Amino acid sequence: SPSDLAKDAAARAGVALVQDGMRLGLGTGSTAVFMVHRLAERIRAEGLRLRCAATSRATCDLAGQLGIHIEELDEIGWLDLTLDGADEIDPDLNLIKGGGGAHLREKIVAAASDRMVVIADPTKVVETLGAFHLPVEVIPFGVETTIVHIRRLLDSLDLTHRPILPRQRDGRIFHTDEDNLILDLSLDVITDCSAISSGLHAIPGVVEHGLFLGMCDLALVGAPDGSVIEMT
Ligand code: DER
């Protein structure tokens, strides 16, 4: 499909940044799947020696199936480059991530990297963040009270929002790799990213949200014809 061609083009451009000996963070999601496949091809073709940390069990499993040796982030310590997808990318390269429910480990890995490069198809590029829901990872204990605090925060910021319920997948409550829950906030337009970010972080039951502010160094946006636009 055109979307797959665009994702693969972005994935190939991201993998082209990988140099022998690098310590890499491998993202999560459908675009990251293309990236892991292209990376495995380069490793096989060129005998690249890399140290790779995964941002989810799903990516760890896929990489393992493709012969990519995955290590724990703490075994590697720090990373040169993280390649990951995004749900939305604004002109300042601020992101919404978490559509796949992996934004906590993704943010930890991105924060442990000298460089974060996002790979995406054109549908992810937006003028203003918010059309995509904002995922928030929360501890299951007392989640109803956490929801009350989030609702009060959104009201204080004059943000309209719909009922806040834990994310479901295949009809069951979704749990993250840390066995936490995800709340998807439908905010429509997010203009004051920092107010939302600091407000959410002040709530005890909130673990992490999907706003990646000032973390992305470069976005590679693929097109179905194989071309790639760089956003910096
Ligand atoms: O969950 C995530 O953060 C993923 O990276 C997501 O944002 C992008 O997933 P996609 O490549 O399947 O659109």
Image: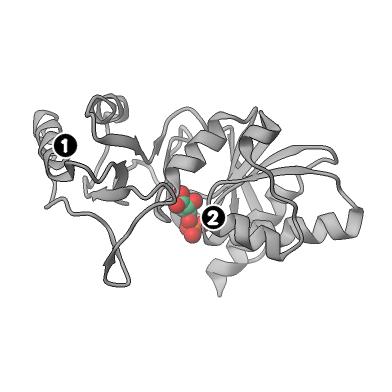
Q: Which mark is residue 96?
A: none
Give the answer, above or below, for where 105 lies relative to 226.
above
Q: Position of residue 108 (x, y in %)?
A: 51, 34
Amino acid type shown at disc 1: Ile
Q: Quadrant of residue 83?
A: top right
Give the answer, above or below, for where 213 lies relative to 122.
above
The residue sitting at 61% across, 55% down in the picture is 60
How far apart marks 1 and 2 lie (CA) works out to: 28 Å
The residue sitting at 40% across, 49% down in the picture is 98
Q: Which residue is mark 1?
A: 150
Q: Say which of 114 and 229 sits in front.
A: 114
Outermost residue toward the front?
141
Q: Position of residue 109 (x, y in %)?
A: 56, 37
Position of 186 with respect to 103 (left or right) is left
Position of 99 with respect to 146 (left or right) is right
N-term-proximal mark, 1 vs 2: 2
Give the answer, above or below, for where 67 lies relative to 16.
below
Q: Say which of 117 and 174 sits in front.
A: 174
Q: Which residue is mark 2?
A: 57
User: Mark 2, residues whose alpha carbon is within 10 Å: few (<14), some, or many (≥20)?
Assistant: few
Amino acid type shown at disc 2: Arg
